[in-house]
Image: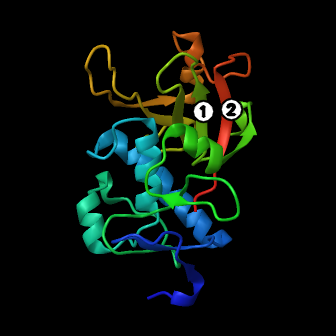
């Protein structure tokens, strides 16, 4: 289906995948469309592999890069049957181990299928602006709350949602588990304009909020 010569093997592990060194502009646009759709769909149809904010990014990125076969579409059960544009070159997966996230620095950087929020921001995304108005669909709104066990928190900017007729500034995120209360956490969806009026000022994506790191753009793959 795809020419093997355009792929490089980034990590040799049993059941790993071959990942292209980089997508061209057409496939990059297709990846982003799938990424946004999958992150948005998670609010309506949660999956067991998403248990925190980084899990949402991992899920959407990993599944956006897979071959979107009829079997994959059946298994994903995306509400409304929505699909994104085809990727010509993406992943050739053998099993579920897809080492798409950079987890170290240097010219021989390692890649893995798992990356926490800090790793995603540090090695798999780049700061665009601290102005939330700069966000494009597929960008990540990042926060850092000092003193927490997991201080970094990520939200995915959807923009216009296929599931909501109104608004072009939708944001989805997973709250993560509440360890003190023993709660698993949940997916949430909110307009950016409403998030900027969040009852707790530390969750407002505004330049005046020191906990708001800014808008980040993913570098995956």
| Location of residue 206 in the rendering, given as x and y in whole percent from the top left corner | 68, 21
Residue 75, placed above or below residue 150: below
Q: Would you place residue 172 above or below residue 68 in this image?
A: above
Q: Mark 2 Cα within 10 Å, few/some/many (few <14, many 20+)?
A: many
- Please state which of residues 19 and 11 is positioned toward the viewer in this rendering: 11
Quarter-wise, where is residue 219 in the image? bottom right
Give the crowd class for mark 1: few <14, some 14-19, many >=20 residues within 10 Å.
many
Q: Is residue 195 left or right of residue 50?
A: right
Q: Find residue 53 and report its image quarter.
A: top left
Quarter of the image for the N terminus: give it: bottom left
**Numbered tag placed on residue 213 in the rendering:** none
x then y, percent, for residue 61? 47, 55
Colouring method of the image: rainbow
Most foreground residue, 219 or 195: 219
For the point 44% across and 51% down, the residue is 114
Q: Is residue 22 above or below residue 104?
A: below
* N-terminal label among 1 and 2: 1
Is residue 162 visible in this depiction of the protein?
A: no
Under circle 1, the secondary element is: strand
Q: CA distance from mark 1 to mark 2?
A: 6 Å
Judging depth in this view, the residue of 119 and 24 nearest the camera is: 119
Q: Residue at x 67, y 29 (%)?
A: 213
Residue 187 location, quadrant: top left
- Say the numbered circle drawn on residue 142: 1
Quadrant housing the C terminus = bottom right
Label 2 sits on residue: 214
Across and down, in percent, residue 150 comes to 48, 27
Which type of secondary structure does the marked residue at label 2 adopt? strand
**CB of mark 1 within 8 Å of CB of mark 2?**
yes
Residue appearing at x 66%, y 42% in the figure: 216
Residue 173 visible in rendering: yes
């Amino acid at each position: 289906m795809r020419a093997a010569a355009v792929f490089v093997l980034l990590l040799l592990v049993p059941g790993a995948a071959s990942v292209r060194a980089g997508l061209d502009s057409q496939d990059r646009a297709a990846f982003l469309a799938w990424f946004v759709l999958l992150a948005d769909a998670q609010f309506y149809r949660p999956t067991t592999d998403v248990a925190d904010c980084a899990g949402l990014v991992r899920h959407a990125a990993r599944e956006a890069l897979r071959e979107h076969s009829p079997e994959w579409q059946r298994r994903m059960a995306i509400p409304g049957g929505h699909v994104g544009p085809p990727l010509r070159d993406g992943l050739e997966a053998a099993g579920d181990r897809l080492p798409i996230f950079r987890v170290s620095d240097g010219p021989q950087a390692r890649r893995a299928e798992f990356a926490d929020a800090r790793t995603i921001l540090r090695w798999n995304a780049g700061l665009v602006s601290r102005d939330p108005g700069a966000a494009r669909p597929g960008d990540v709104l990042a926060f850092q709350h000092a003193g927490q066990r997991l201080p970094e928190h990520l939200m995915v900017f959807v923009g216009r949602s296929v599931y909501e007729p109104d608004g072009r500034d939708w944001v989805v995120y997973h709250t993560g588990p509440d360890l003190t209360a023993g709660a698993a956490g949940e997916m949430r969806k909110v307009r950016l304009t409403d998030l900027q009026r969040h009852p707790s000022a530390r969750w407002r994506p505004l330049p005046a909020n020191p906990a708001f790191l800014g808008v980040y753009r993913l570098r995956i793959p």
